[in-house]
Amino acid sequence: MKREELWHLDPPLLTGVLTLCALSLVILYSAGGENWSLLLRQGMRMVLAVMVMVALAQVTPETLSRWAPWVFGIGLALLLLVLLVGIVGKGAQRWLNLGLFRFQPAEIMKLGVPMMVAWALTRNPLPPRLRDLSLAAVVVAVPSALVVLQPDLGTALLIASSGVLVIFLAGIRWRWLGLLALGAAAAAPLMWFYVLRDYQRSRIITLFDPWSDPLGAGYHTIQSIIAVGSGGVNGKGWLNGSQSQLEFIPERGTDFIFAVYAEEFGLIGASIILGLYLFVVGRGLYISFYAQDTFSRLVAGSLSLTFFFYLFVNMGMVSGILPVVGVPLPLISYGGTSMVTLLAGFGILMSIQTHRKLMPQ
């Protein structure tokens, strides 16, 4: 028996993920002002995340399917608990204090929602009927709304997209997609006036002209664009980015870490990291295509495409083509709960790949 079969690990996906994690430590050392303590904390979180990934890779897809309602239910209960007793930080109530560390329950729903939607839709033949779509819509909408209330619009968008992608991959009819688009368009004015906060509306408005408020809502975008552009083709070199080292870039270890990387490593470096990301996404889609059952196919496809959406939103935000919504760069930005959730998702992908009975030649 091969070693990867014994441990149920997918070598190509594992290589891509661990390469991005290693690159994260290099970038964080610069973005964090050469802070070894920060690097050590992130390294410990990565070790924990890798352990979770390896553990989930050993679980069969059939077991994951049975777990789906439990994961969703626990995640939903924790989201309600956050609204009651959650820690408030930077104007948002998103975390639970577990003593030794803080935990962000919304991250669980990045796995819980696609698993639950896939579980619900595969109870009946596909393509889904209206009743199945209505249930799936509730599964997506309830946790997304709870996260918006925290408020955390970026995470809510990622959670919603993970569920919507499952519905799309399940073979939803085009007329339902059209009705969904019309519903979203009709809800947009309500979202603008009654859901979005003032600072969120300001970020959307300043997206089209960040210089209209250069020291306020447009500051993040302006400094990020300057950093990315000043990196040129070759970059300024590791630890030599003026925008990052002089602390002009806000949130440079989390949401805007790509601006730090682009300034120091330039277009060439940005192309390399983008290639690594696309390799990971492509491997995930390959696993989805050859998945053995419908539940596995839907979950693997959703996790892979959501990871790409995660990446697209962050890079679009940093480059000024999307509004600032607080979405970190996956596997690279500083953070604990997000890192564990992402690697848990890759563990699920490895489980789906390595537990197949018929391996393509």
Image (cartoon, rainbow, N blue to C red):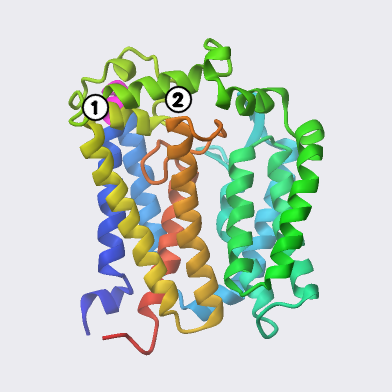
- 209 in relation to 135, above or below: above
Question: Which quarter of the rendering shows the N terminus?
Answer: bottom left
Between residues 52 and 100, which one lies in front from this camera angle? 52
Q: Amino acid at mark 1?
A: Gly
- Residue 282: where, in percent of width, then height? 36, 63
- 93 in relation to 306, above or below: above
The tag on residue 200 is none
Residue tagged 2:
251
- Residue 290: where, in percent of width, then height? 41, 80
Is residue 31 a member of the stretch shown in magenta? yes
In the figure, is residue 166 to the left or right of 36? right
Q: Residue furthest bottom?
A: 358
Query: Visible in this render: residue 255?
Result: no
Q: How many numbered marks appear? A: 2
In the figure, is residue 17 to the left or right of 309? left
Residue tagged 1:
232
Report the residue at 64% width, 37% height from top: 152
Q: Residues within 10 Å of mark 1 (few under 14, many from 20)?
A: some
In the image, the segment drawn in magenta is 29-36
Label 2 sits on a secondary structure element that is: loop
Earlier along the polypeptide chain: callout 1 or callout 2? 1
Between residues 286 and 115, which one lies in front from this camera angle? 286
- 119 in relation to 41, above or below: below
Q: Residue furthest top?
A: 215
User: On the image, which quarter does residue 188 sit in?
Assistant: top right
Q: Residues within 10 Å of mark 2 (few under 14, many from 20)?
A: some
Is residue 232 a member of the stretch shown in magenta? no
In the figure, is residue 44 to the left or right of 90? left
Question: Which quarter of the rendering shows the C terminus?
Answer: bottom left
Q: Amino acid at mark 2?
A: Glu
